[in-house]
Amino acid sequence: MAAAAALLFVFALARIELSSCSQFVRAKVSCLDCNQPYNFSGIKVLVKCDKVKKLAMATTEDDGSFEVKLPSDGTDISKSSDLPMNCHAKLLGGPTQLYSSRKSMVSRIIETHEKPNSYTISTPLSFYSACPTTYAKCKDMNKLGSSKTINLPLPPEWGLAPPSFYIPCFPIVTGIP
């Protein structure tokens, strides 16, 4: 009987959330050019705090929300003298290519007033699903020419292969004495 009571006590302790010791970041990512039923699952968000070597990684749910425990080195962050806390969340990427500016890719983590030891991001983590033309890098990508090769008209009687087979191929000679 005592063993069963002890086992029940252990299971009860296992079910208790240590929310008083754990500090969580809860937030959402957003898409700036997506259609309404967009699947946000699988997008990675990194959380980093100053003076802590560990990082925390979160994966978003279908609606773009994520929850991750703040990284710590064993000491309670809220009791340290480094308040306000200097933690940041960074949008890393997802299952498809994401485009984001430096401003909307990183956000400072701030304390919420809803629950104790609960944090959120100060600015939204947002991205584009397609490269917007307002970004300089996207404009540069469109400036590249085509990859067509130049075919000089050679008489077929010469029996040579098309010039595109051998003209653009210049040997690179490096390190040969």
Image (spheres, rainbow, N blue to C red):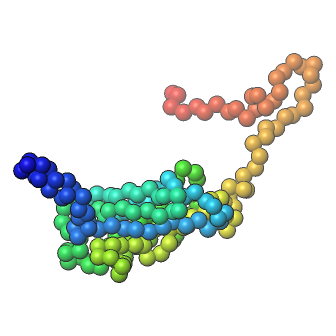
Q: Is residue 163 above or below residue 93?
A: above
Q: Is residue 1 among what the camera can see?
A: yes
Q: Is residue 176 above or below residue 66?
A: above
Q: Nearer the viewer, residue 108 or 139?
A: 108
- Furthest-left residue in this view: 2
User: Based on the displayed image, in which of its 4 quarters is residue 26 positioned?
Assistant: bottom left
Q: Nearer the viewer, residue 77 or 154?
A: 77
Q: Is residue 7 left or right of residue 146?
A: left
The residue shown at (50%, 53%) is 42
- Tally of numbered tags: 0
Q: Is residue 136 left or right of residue 121?
A: right
Q: Is residue 163 left or right of residue 6?
A: right
- Residue 117: percent from the left, percent from the top? 29, 73
Q: Is residue 38 left or right of residue 62?
A: right
The residue shown at (44%, 56%) is 59
Q: Is residue 49 among what the camera can see?
A: no
Q: Is residue 32 above or below residue 164?
A: below
- Residue 175: percent from the left, percent from the top? 51, 31
The residue shown at (43%, 62%) is 66
Q: Nearer the viewer, residue 114 or 52?
A: 114
User: Based on the displayed image, in which of its 4 quarters is residue 16 positioned?
Assistant: bottom left
- Residue 124: percent from the left, percent from the top? 50, 72
- Residue 22: percent from the left, percent from the top? 26, 66
- Furthest-front residue in this view: 1
The residue shown at (40%, 72%) is 120
